[in-house]
Image (tube, rainbow, N blue to C red):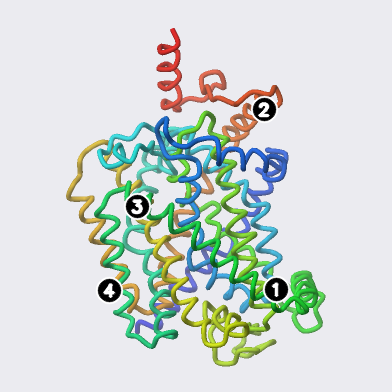
Amino acid sequence: MGSFDFAELLSQVSDAIWGPMAYVVLGLGVAYSVATKGVQFTRIPDMLRQLRENDGSQGGLSSFQALVLALASRVGVGSIAGVATAIGAGGPGALLWMAVTGLVGCTVGYAEATLSQAFKRQVLDEDRRKANEDIGGMPYYIKYGLKLPKIGALVAVLGVIGYGVVFPGFQVNTIAASAKLAFDVPTWVPATLVTALIAAVIFGGTTRLVKVTQFLVPVLAIGYLLLALTVIALNIQQVPQAFALIVQSALGIHPMLGGIAGAAVAWGVRRAVFASSNGLGEATFAAAAARTSHPAKQGLVQTFSIYIDVLLICMATGLMMVVSGKFNVSDGSGGFFINNVPGVDAGANWVQEAIDTVIPGWGAGFIAVAVLLFGFACLLAYFYVANSNLLYLLNGRNGHGWKLALKLGTMAIVFIGSIANAKLIWAAGDIGLGLIAWVNLICLVFLFPTVRKIHADYERQRKLGLNPTFNPLELGIDGADFWVESGEKDRVSKS
């Protein structure tokens, strides 16, 4: 079987994994939204307050640093190229379903972050101690929350392999493709550059990684949003028509695109899940690293990060393409319902075309640089996740050889991913993410009562006008040793 056939086979396997899973995330999001009485809407002021509350001086990362680390994994090429592929396959209506999924599904992110905080541990790794962090995430709440250490270990192994030596491939593959289109350079050139940059940061330790990410992500997000809003503003007369097209396409009442309303839903839900990482567990490790007084507080911060990614960056990307008319819509049979940019594949190239309508000749270069920087920030977040999973498996042991192997493996896939078959790289990445997500989602179903209990405790204290604090013993939650030990230390210091 040739490589092309193998890539096609992997794509079919990926579709089989992701097709139903996206709807599971949406359904779980509805369940958590009901259980928390719409926490994503009712506690927006608390989200903003929490970002200012903790500066990290008492140990752990600040809530803002944890937010930025989470955004680094979320605001990758999926927020640019992923939005374009959703429009290309599902029509502009996919944008509406992306927004709906982001609003409803963000409670899954709330649950993940809350559980990560509740079942985190004091870090044993020397590098992480220097970075002043706590540690937790998917494997921890599976082991200590569900009492399933073997499943936790399985997720950690998948996380090391996936985030360390597989998933970085589709980030750097997009970086190389954008650079080739913009500057006509061989793919090995950006590959070498990104590999060198990654090496400089990951060999510099966690402190350097956090500092680079903390600087890079806000600057990138704000700069990209300003450019997108400029394109939209200069096409302001097309905005009402664009909104009408999006709504009609989403609801299946558009004369031309009504027949693919199902595809609009499918691709909108799928890409929203992919872009936001809801249910995938990526942001759980950053969430656990923050120090706060109640797990629900960091859950609110992670909910806010999904707003920034899906409702701001993804929507700005999509609207920029629609108002400028720089998109195609496939009919699924090799033809097109809409073919505004003939011969240009769905992806970052459409965003380049949209920018060119405002600043001719600048689009390709700007997006190539943006994709490079967004992708680089995402690669840093991926390494952080992989390293966190490895530390779970090492369980306090030094493991210098394993740590070095992870760094070298990350550098290798960063280089190889730029020259490998794009379809093969994306399909393999999708399959790996999907496998981790399925395990995580099933665990989130069984941890539903725990999340509801922690959230109810937060709400009770807020209604009493208190600054919520967490005592797992009072709630009958077993396995939250970090909070028990911290509570004992506080009681000793006060007595």
Residue under label 4, please give it. 192
Q: Residues within 10 Å of mark 2 (few under 14, many from 20)?
A: few
Q: Secondary structure at mark 4?
A: helix
- Name of the residue lying farthest toward the top: 495
Residue under label 1, please give it. 233
Q: Real-space Cα distance between discs 1 and 4?
A: 37 Å
Q: Amino acid at mark 1?
A: Ala
Quadrant position of residue 266: bottom right
* For the residues bearing labels 2 and 4, Cβ distance under 8 angstroms: no
Is the residue 101 above or below the residue 65 in the image? Answer: below
Horizontal and vertical percent for residue 188?
Answer: 29, 79
Is the residue 289 above or below the residue 270 in the image? Answer: above
Residue under label 2, please give it. 462
- The residue that appears at 66% across and 58% down in the rendered structure is 101
- The residue that appears at 35% across and 82% down in the rendered structure is 3
- The residue that appears at 61% across and 72% down in the rendered structure is 86
Mark 2 or 1: in front is 1
Q: Amino acid at mark 2?
A: Arg
